[in-house]
Image: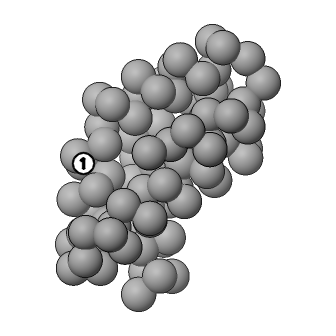
Amino acid sequence: MIEAALSVLDNDMQRNELAVFYERHKNRFFGIAYSKLHNPEEAEDAVQETFQRVADNPDKFFTMADRERVRYVDGIVRHVSVDKF
């Protein structure tokens, strides 16, 4: 689902780290998007767009601790979902 976002990153370490983060938290992010959009396809699109935005600005994401990353991505997925709504 996030292959496009992973392909933008510069190195394998970042790609692996983002992929692991996604796998660990994807249900949480989908739930946030679905709660706003009430449509599974649109929620998946919102999560995908969220991770594309993360990959477009990797320096910010990769300098954060894991808990900060979760809050950061929560905020992005909320904004993307509201924009899609």
- Is residue 59 something that shows in the picture? yes
Q: For this rendering, which residue is in front, 53 or 61?
A: 53
Q: Residue at x 60, y 23 (%)?
A: 15
Q: x%, y% of residue 83?
A: 51, 82
Q: Quadrant of the C terminus?
A: bottom left
In terms of image quadrants, where is residue 66?
Answer: top left
Total marks placed: 1
Q: Residue at x 54, y 48 (%)?
A: 51
Q: Is residue 64 above or below residue 74?
A: above
Q: Type of residue at label 1?
A: Arg
Q: x%, y% of residue 25?
A: 30, 37
What is the residue that sits farthest to the top in this orientation?
A: 13
Q: Circle 1 sits on which residue? A: 28
Q: Residue at x 50, y 70 (%)?
A: 80
Q: x%, y% of residue 53?
A: 63, 53
Colour basis: one colour
Q: Residue at x 23, y 46 (%)?
A: 27
